[in-house]
Amino acid sequence: MRVVEGRAEIPDVGAFVAELDAVGERHGATVQAFDARYVVDRAHLERAVALADRARERDDTIADDFGVEILLYAAGRRQINRALEMGVSEGECPVVAVVVGGDEAGAADDLRTHLEPADVLGTYDPERVRSFFGVTDTELEATDGSLADAVRERVALLPVEK
C-alpha cells in the first residue's frame, strides 16, 4: 500500500474520480481518495485496506468495487451513500489516497501529478471527525484513548457488524 497526499482543486468530483480510476487502470492498481479532513492517520488507512483485503479474500465484501470497499472500512460504515461523505468534494480539497496492488510505485508517482504537494495526512478536523464517526465527549472521557483511537476502533468493528 502506498499513501499519496496533497491538495486538489476539484471542479467536478466525477471527472476527478475518473482520472484517479484511469491512474489505477494504467498501473493495475486500486486508487481510493479521501478528504483528508476525515482521515486521522496512516494507521486508519492501513487498517481499512487490510480489512477490505481480508473481506475480498474471504469473498465477503460489501461492495463490488475494491476501492469502495476500502472507503466503507475507512468510514466504518456499511452504507455506501453515507461513506461517500468521506470522499473528495468539489472545490479546494485536501486529499489523501491509497494505492493498492499492481505497480504501486508507478501509480503513486502518476497520482502525484494530479495533486499539489502538501502534507495533509494527520491534519484532520476534530469536530468533523467526531460528528462523522459519532464519537461523543462521554466516550472520550471514559477512555485513555484519543480521538484517533476511537476512529480506528470504529474501522475495526465494521467486520463484527456484518
Image (cartoon, grey):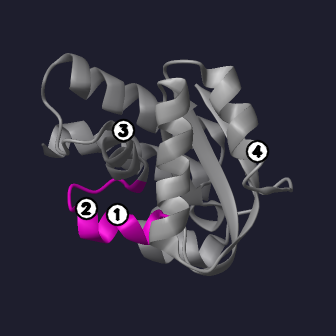
Image check: 67 left or right of 2?
A: left
Report if the CB atoms under discs 3 and 2 are less than 8 Å apart: no
Question: What is the distance, in whole Å, between disc 2 and disc 1 at their CAs?
Answer: 5 Å
Q: Main secondary structure of the magenta part?
A: helix
Marking on residue 160: none
Let me know if residue 101 appears in the view: yes
Three-letter amino acid code of the residue under disc 2:
Ile
Which residue is tagged 3? 156
Question: What is the distance, in whole Å, between disc 2 and disc 4 at their CAs?
Answer: 26 Å
Q: Residue at 63% x, 31% y: name it.
A: 107
Report if the CB atoms under discs 2 and 4 are less than 8 Å apart: no
Three-letter amino acid code of the residue under disc 4:
Arg
Give the secondary structure at mark 4: helix
Q: Residue at 77% x, 48% y: name it.
A: 113
Q: Residues within 10 Å of mark 3 (few under 14, many from 20)?
A: some
> Nearer the N terminus, badge 4 or badge 3?
4
Which residue is tagged 2? 80
Which residue is tagged 4? 112
Q: Residue at 37% x, 66% y: name it.
A: 84
Q: Is residue 83 above or below residue 41?
A: below
- Residue 158: x and y in percent read 26, 44
Report if the CB atoms under discs 2 and 1 are less than 8 Å apart: yes
> Nearer the N terminus, badge 3 or badge 2?
2
The quadrant of the rendering that contains the N terminus is top right
Is residue 55 part of the magenta span, yes or no?
no
Magenta residues, start to end: 75-87
Give the secondary structure at mark 2: helix
Give the secondary structure at mark 1: helix
Give the secondary structure at mark 3: helix
Look at discs 2 and 4 and give the one toward the viewer. Answer: 4
Q: Residues within 10 Å of mark 2 (few under 14, many from 20)?
A: some
Q: Is residue 125 above or below residue 116?
A: below
